[in-house]
Structures are given as C-alpha cells and as structure tokens.
Amino acid sequence: MLAVTARSSTYPASELEQACSLAADLGAEHLVIDSEELDIEGFSNNPPDRCYYCKHELFGKLAEIARARNYRFVIDGSNLDDDSDYRPGGRAAAELGVKSPLREAGFTKEMIREFSRSMGLATADKPAYACLASRFPYHHKIDARRLKMVGAAEEFLKKEGLSGFRVRCHDNLARLEVREDDRGYFSQGANRDKVAAYFKSIGFHYVVLDLEAYRSGRMNEELDLS
C-alpha cells in the first residue's frame, strides 16, 4: 500500500500535517505530491461540477503513480453516506476506475468512526472536512488570496476551541456557520470582538454569524438537482 496526499492551496497546512502524522502512525509509505486546482481550466470559475475538475486531475496523477509503481488499484475513502449528497467528483472516480472499498462494503461514516475507535486511530473523532473551495458560493470566483483568508480564519476558530464550523466567503464578507453547541462562544462580547478583529486583519470587511446552524453540504442546497 502507498498513501498519497496532494498538497494544494485549497487545503490548510494543518491537514497535510495530520495526514503525514497518520501515515507515520500506521507505518505506511507516504508520498506527498502537488496538485494545484487553481491551475486547472474552469476550476476557479467555481461551477457546480467544480469537484469533477479537481478529482479528475488528482485521480489522473494517482493513476500515473500506480502504473509507475505497479499498484493494481487507486482507492479513495468515499463511503455510503456520500451517495446522499451532490458529489460530482464521483464521476471522475468512475471514469478513471478508482475503487471505493468503504462504499462497496456498505460502510457509513458512523461505522467508520466506530471501527476507527476500536482500532485506536487518532482520526476516529476528527470533524468532517472538505476543501476550502467549498466555502465559496457557486459561480463566485475562487482565488489564492481568498483561499488563504478562509484557511486562516478557520484555523483561528479551531484554536479558539470550536469544532464543526465553516467560514463561508462572500467576496469581502465572512459568514460563520457553527454547530448549535458552539454558539455559546459567540454570546460573549469579548469573543465576538476578538473574532471580528482577527477576520478584518486578514482581509475581510464584514463578519456575520449565520442564524442557522452548520450542516454539511450547505452550499449544495441552492442547486436544482431534480
């Protein structure tokens, strides 16, 4: 087995560090490659099938590595719950013959967490995470500067002890989605002031707290998938 992690501007450095740490804990051979989505034609325009472009690029690179090293399969971590959301990246996986053993075995996210706990994996309770490009409304252009702003904003909230949140980027406005049990943090004026000051220091002009709680796939709700 060869573990491969793609490094790009759409993921913060902390995610790469965790991937390297997990591979080391597992004793797996680990290869870090570069895959810069902003260089892919059409990606930065942020169409609804943006993930297709990203995954096609990534899986193509993985397939080349597999052929060069005589590995039979490229596999990803998709699971059964992914079928309930809009996942255009799955089309790229199908086109390039990528296998999804967790999905094929009928594993849900909760089952994966349960087995991970039984195996003592450090990632068992890791909050779900999607690339930073998912913080932008569809058809709003994605650029390196705003990706860096969103990444820094989310790292700040993580250090403040919050988990399960998203910083959505609407041009120069940051819209915070947080879990219900993390909303108490913002009931303190000092915390609100601290967050607003930091967000403005990294480039946002306005900072707002969404009245609805965070839920995965929120940006997909504006799509007509019928």
Image (cartoon, rainbow, N blue to C red):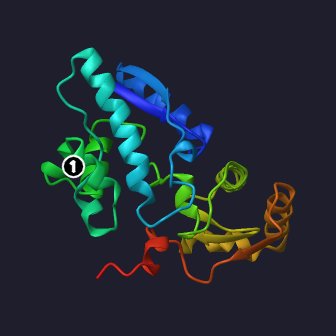
Nearest the camera: 23 or 86? 86
**Residue 111, percent across and down?**
24, 53
Identify the image quadrant of the C terminus.
Answer: bottom left
Report the residue marked by disc 1.
Answer: 94
Task: Please name the amino acid that badge 1 sits on.
Answer: Ala
Identify whether 39 is placed above or below 217.
above
Corner quadrant of residue 220: bottom left
- Left/right placement of residue 187 relative to residue 54 reads right
List the single residue furthest toward the front. Answer: 41
Secondary element type, mark 1: helix
- Left/right placement of residue 71 relative to residue 31 reads left
**Residue 163, percent across and down?**
56, 58
Nearest the camera: 104 or 127? 104
Identify whether 97 is placed above or below 45.
above
The local crowd at label 1, few if under 14, some if 14 to 19, many if 20 or more residues have their Cα within 10 Å, is few
Q: Residue at x 52, y 72 (%)?
A: 214
- Left/right placement of residue 106 relative to residue 193 reads left
Q: Residue at x 21, y 45 (%)?
A: 100
Q: Residue at x 21, y 49 (%)?
A: 94
- Is residue 218 in view? yes
Nearest the camera: 56 or 213? 56
Identify whether 159 is placed above or below 45.
above
